[in-house]
Amino acid sequence: MDNQNQHNNSGQRRFGGRGDRKPFRERKEKEFDERVLEVARVTRVVAGGKRFKFRAAVVIGDRKGKVGFGLGKGSDVAQSVQKAVHHAKKEMVTVPIIKGTIPSGIKVKYGSSVIYLKPAPAGRGINAGGAVRTVSELAGIKDIIGKIVSRSGNKINNARATLKALKIIAAKHLRT
């Protein structure tokens, strides 16, 4: 007996044959690219012991001048990443990109992180590491020289310092 013609005991038709599939839905392309910087398991000590959660640090960008950073905590990794993306969308920065690079150099301090960003000639590429590279790539900057001056290995502060620098550059660029 063929799957499409099978019936259950109540005389109703049972689904499951090839003809019962839903029509193919086109996948909606995401508005922003996302890159997870860090996922950490964090704990909270309560009377009964420890409660575990996950913290995700995510950078999002459209590679056309918009970039954002967000932190999210959740009971599982997927939930924390989703919250971080939602937070990053609220904290978007529009970066002025002139001939593939930033208009001027800048040195910024955020917490213990000190970041130095400098425009680079065309074809140089992204000369930066860690969070500075990730933020620059997702912002759509093609050529930049970035240096994490402090010895801080804190990816979250490095990403925030980079975004702070890009915000200052954007504000300067708007004034002129």
Image (tube, grey):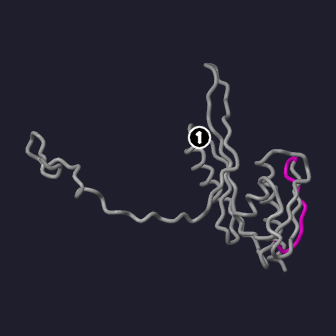
| Towards the viewer: 34 or 21 | 21
Residue nearest the observer in this picture, 4 or 95:
4
Identified by mark 1, the residue type is Gly
Q: Is residue 71 left or right of residue 97?
A: left
The residue range painted magenta reads: 102-112
Q: Is residue 23 left or right of residue 96?
A: left
Of all residues, the one furthest to the left in this rendering is 11
Question: Label 1 neighbourhood size at 10 Å, few (<14), some (14-19), many (20+)?
Answer: some
Query: Which corner quadrant of the image does residue 105 belong to?
Result: bottom right
Residue drawn where x is 90% and y is 46% of the image: 151
Residue with the most extreme front position: 1
Q: Which image quadrant is residue 146 in?
A: bottom right
Q: Is residue 136 left or right of residue 116?
A: left
Find residue 88 and report its image quarter.
bottom right
Residue 173 vertical position relative to residue 27 in the rendered view, above or below: below
User: How many marks can you see?
Assistant: 1
Residue 116, how many percent across, how many down?
Answer: 89, 60
* Position of 9 relative to 35 (above/below): above
Q: Is residue 152 above or below residue 116?
A: above
Q: Position of residue 19 (x, y in %)?
A: 22, 58
Q: Residue at x 77, y 48 (%)?
A: 155
User: Element at badge 1?
Assistant: strand
Q: Position of residue 158 (x, y in %)?
A: 81, 52
Q: Which residue is mark 1?
A: 74
User: Which residue occupies 76% across, 63% down?
Assistant: 136
Query: Viewer-proximal residue, 15 or 114?
Result: 15
Identified at 77% across, 74% down, the residue is 96
State yes or no: residue 110 in magenta.
yes
Q: Which quadrant holds the C terminus?
A: bottom right
Position of residue 6 in the picture relative to residue 74 (left or right): left
Q: Which one is in front, 144 or 110?
A: 144
